[in-house]
Amino acid sequence: MSHPRLSFHGAAGAVTGSCFRLQTEAGQVLIDCGLFQGSKTEKELNYRPFPFAPGKIAAVILSHAHIDHSGLLPKLVRHGFSGAIHATPATIDLAGVMLPDSAHIQEIEVEQFNRRAAHRNRDRVSPIYDGTDVAACLDLLRPQDLGDWFAVLPGLRARFWNAGHLLGSASIEIELAQGGDEPPLRLMFSADIGPDSKLMHSDPEGPSGVDYLICESTYGDVDREEATAARRRALLREEVRAAMHPNGALLIPSFAVERAQELISDIGRLIADGELPDIPIHVDSPLATQATRIFARHHRELEEGAVLMRGLRARNLHFTETVEQSKALDRLHGFHIVIAASGMCDAGRIRHRLRNWLWRDEATVLFTGYQAEGTLGRILQDGARSVRIQGEEFRVRARIRSLDLYSGHADGPELADWIKARLPLAHDLFLVHGEPDAIEGLAARLAGVVDPDRILRPVLDEEFELTATGARRLGGAAPRRLRPEMVARLDWHNDVSRLILDINEALASEPDEKVRAVLIRRLRRALDPDEGAGRRA
């Protein structure tokens, strides 16, 4: 291999499944290995074989513990990987609770799926991985401190830079020896970059003058105005006040790690300062409970660690760990707040809370994080009047609200500033971890800063050769698992769910029995045109 190669096996034209593969003369390295979320078409990638041989991967460098960056590591181990997984100490602590939780959720969801499949005479599925795979994966984690170079392979070293996104999160700088008197090839992977106003972290950092830069673009087309801590708390206060109903609830779908802890801190502070009444707060997530203990252990590393600890000692804060405790929340009386995972409503206990409250006028659902295309959260955020949850239809009567200032991602101007601080750039900028509009929005912000011809937009499973004069797209690589137009899009599963809801709504709204019968006959003819033709004959 004359030049190293870089392949994009996730987070290419989408925001989940982050996984980049660097091939060198000394071996292959993965940067992250995350779970796909979104439409069923994308999530099915989690069950399909990797587009590379796991046993040939020599090492993994893990940017942070979020499941869309770490969630397929146990699968990698299950299928033959046995090398080191390099991560910061805090990332290792969080992975120690997040990956077992991921395996547990898979077991529950697969059990529910197989029960429904049996009723419909469909094939069963197996979990992507189990607790044994997670334990083997955790044994491979190797701690590396921020700023310290560490050897990954012969001639390849790396170091972590604070990314300001999550406890332990890091951007990754890689130096690859080129032989002779040539200077090393320098690559910089942003991973997820936190905003300047992040509650618990200092601003992101990084080196300048790299050869290749791989940067996220989640909010590349967004400009958050007045994104200050005071404004964030003021907007949260108003949302809580507007949601207050004597017999209601405020449901906050939340990522269990960090988002939940930020909300605990801010709501606790608003109550302590007298800006909100003493509202019961229930954190309905075993993972959030475990993660909160880790945050408490690392609170001295956090900018607002003292505020978090004060919020955790509040008498109105309750954690539900067992299934029985979670079910008991459905019997609560009086206004209360429930913070429950998952943040995109794709899994976890928030789906049970939504089943109980979504059809009620007195409920409010407040989104505080990014909702990927095809997720239940995005469908609700886009104004759906009814949705299907686990095969059951629910009318949406609850107020649906969004508060973007809790996002763990930098906005467009902040991403552009972070990129500018990495200049001069010797070769190319790859924009990843964003949907197409966000990628184009960030690219537009870089006009006059980075040569447009040097801004590359890789698609899923695309491979590039990193030459001395720039990146070169390679043809004839392994078949791509999804066409680009199928990534970060609603799929046929979403279309079928929407069709079923529309049919039910049309039939329910028609009072005339004969008209309903005509509509049903037309639908049957559309599904079986040969039968309709036979009847006409």
Image (tube, helix red, strand yellow):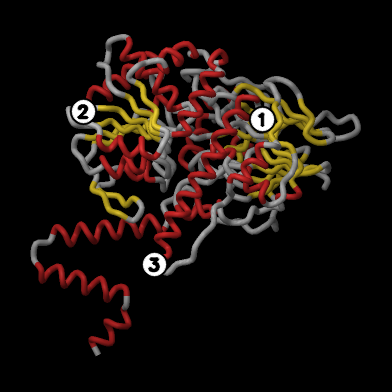
Mark 1 and mark 3 lie on one chain; the one further toward the N terminus is 1
Which residue type carries mark 1?
A: Ala
Q: Is residue 293 left or right of residue 243?
A: right
Vertically, is 203 above or below 63? above
The residue under label 3 is which amino acid type?
Answer: Arg
> Based on the displayed image, in which of its 4 quarters is residue 261 positioned?
top left
Residue at the disc numbered 2:
334
Q: Quadrant of the C terminus?
A: bottom left
Task: Name the element at disc 1.
Answer: strand
Q: Which mark is residue 120?
A: 3
Precedes in sequence: disc 2 or disc 1: 1
User: Where residue 218 appears, x then y in whole percent?
Assistant: 49, 35
Q: Residue at x 27, y 10 (%)?
A: 274
Query: Can residue 428 be seen at all in this image of the molecule?
Result: yes
**Residue 87's disc number:** 1
Whether 526 is drawn above or below 455: the answer is below
Looking at the image, is 14 positioned above or below residue 208? below
